[in-house]
Each structure stands twice: as C-alpha cells, then as structure tokens.
C-alpha cells in the first residue's frame, strides 16, 4: 500500500485558500481534518498517510508513521511509548 499526502491550501494542486464550493477542496479539507486512530492527531497537509477505508468516503485515515510503527512494534508498544513521551 502506498502512502499519500494532501497538498497544502493555495499550493499548485491544493485546495483553495479560502472557503469555496469546490467538491475536491471540501474533500481535501475533510481528509486533512480526519483524526488518526493511533495518535488522535489530525492527518493534516503534507504528511504521509494511509487510507484504510473500504470503498469510498476516506473514513479510515492514519498517519503513515503511526501505522508503520504499529506494524513494527505492535499497537500496545506504540501506545506505551506515546505515554512515556507525554504526547
């Protein structure tokens, strides 16, 4: 599975800087605001992420870094490490 990124607002391929009626812009903003299930942080722009959604909707996005650490160390070890760092 390849990780994707979301271009920043106002960049060549990014959403409009201000609110607009473009569906693509709205979907990109929605994806950027989605919360990673591992770290509870927003997916954000210019950050690698995986879309684990089945079908359409982009409802299951996770940061690539979070997912890769979970695969390497396991979910429990990931959460233990986050507790230890205070993040």
Image (tube, grey):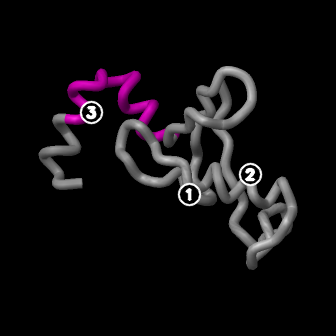
Q: Which residues, given as a range, are shown in magenta? A: 64-79
Q: Identify which residue is drawn at 19% across, 39% down.
A: 81
Which comes sooner in the sequence, label 2 or label 1? Answer: 2
Q: Residue tagged by mark 1?
A: 44
Q: Nearer the viewer, residue 50 or 61?
A: 61
The structure residue drawn at horizontal position 41% and vertical position 52%, both measured from the top left corner, is 41
Quarter of the image where the C terminus is located? bottom left
Residue highlighted by disc 3? 78
Looking at the rendered structure, the secondary structure element under dot 3 is helix
The residue beneath circle 2 is: 27
Q: For the residues carrying marks 2 and 3, which lies nearer the camera in this image?
A: 2
Q: Position of residue 53 (x, y in %)?
A: 63, 27
Image: 86 above or below 60: below
Tell me, yes or no, whether the two marked residues, 2 and 1, touch with CB atoms within 8 Å.
Answer: no
Contact (CB < 8 A) between labels 3 and 1? no
Residue 23 place in picture, x, y as percent: 84, 55
Q: Secondary structure at mark 1?
A: loop
Question: Height in image: 38 above or below 25?
Answer: above
- Residue 34 sits inside the magenta stretch: no
Residue at x 58%, y 46% (from the top left corner): 48
Q: Is residue 20 above or below residue 84?
A: below
Mark 3–mark 1 Cα distance, whole angstroms, equals 21 Å
Q: For this view, does 16 lie left or right of residue 42?
A: right
Q: Quadrant of residue 55?
A: top right
Cα distance, mark 2 to mark 3? 29 Å
Q: Residue at x 79, y 60 (%)?
A: 25
């Amino acid at each position: 599975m390849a990780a994707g990124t979301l271009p920043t607002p106002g960049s060549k391929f990014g959403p409009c800087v201000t609110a607009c009626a473009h569906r693509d812009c709205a979907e990109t903003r929605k994806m950027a605001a989605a919360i990673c299930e591992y770290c509870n942080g927003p997916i954000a722009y210019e950050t690698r992420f995986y879309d684990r959604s089945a079908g359409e909707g982009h409802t299951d996005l996770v940061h690539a870094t979070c997912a890769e650490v979970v695969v390497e160390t396991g979910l429990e070890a990931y959460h233990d490490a986050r507790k230890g760092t205070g993040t």
